[in-house]
Image (spheres, rainbow, N blue to C red):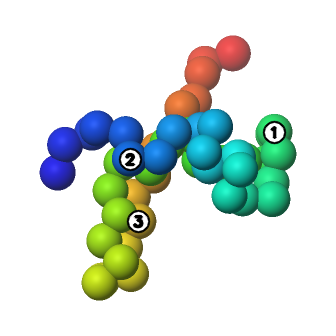
Amino acid sequence: MNNKTVIDHREIAKILPHGYPFLLVDRVVHIDLDNNEIIGQKNVTVN
């Protein structure tokens, strides 16, 4: 699996009803609907 973005944060915001700060996915990097699997990433800062 590579880390190429499948769905970015703008598209996720259109799909999910959650807004900042509750939108806990920044991008989706893998979708496998046959196995009901989605892998997402959340960016975290150190402040």
Q: Is residue 15 above or below residue 47?
A: below
Please identify, in this view, whether the residue under mark 2 or under mark 1 is nearer the observer.
2
Circle 2 residue? 6
Q: Quadrant of residue 32?
A: bottom left
Mark 1 burial class by Cα count in 10 Å: few <14, some 14-19, many 20+? few
The percent coordinates of residue 15 (x first, y second) are 68, 58
Q: Amino acid at mark 1?
A: Tyr
Circle 3 residue? 38
Q: Residue furthest left?
A: 1
Q: Which badge, 1 or 3, comes first in the chain's sequence?
A: 1
Question: Is 43 or 29 nearer to us in this picture?
Answer: 29
Q: Which badge, 3 or 2, comes first in the chain's sequence?
A: 2
Q: Residue 20, labelled with which disc?
A: 1
Residue at (69, 15) in percent of width and height? 47
- Left or right: 19 as drawn, with respect to 39: right
Q: From mark 2 to mark 1, how far is it between C-alphas?
A: 21 Å
Marks 2 and 1: CB-CB under 8 Å?
no
Residue at (39, 58) in percent of width and height? 39
Please identify, in this view, whether the residue under mark 3 or under mark 2 is nearer the observer.
2
Q: Which badge, 2 or 1, comes first in the chain's sequence?
A: 2
Q: From mark 1 to mark 3, how far is it between C-alphas?
A: 21 Å
Q: Amino acid at mark 2?
A: Val
Q: Quadrant of residue 11?
A: top right
Mark 2 burial class by Cα count in 10 Å: few <14, some 14-19, many 20+? few
Q: Is residue 43 above or below residue 33?
A: above
Q: Is residue 13 above or below residue 10?
A: below
Q: Secondary structure at mark 3?
A: strand
Q: Secondary structure at mark 2?
A: loop
Marks 1 and 3: CB-CB under 8 Å?
no
Q: Secondary structure at mark 1?
A: loop
Mark 3 burial class by Cα count in 10 Å: few <14, some 14-19, many 20+? few
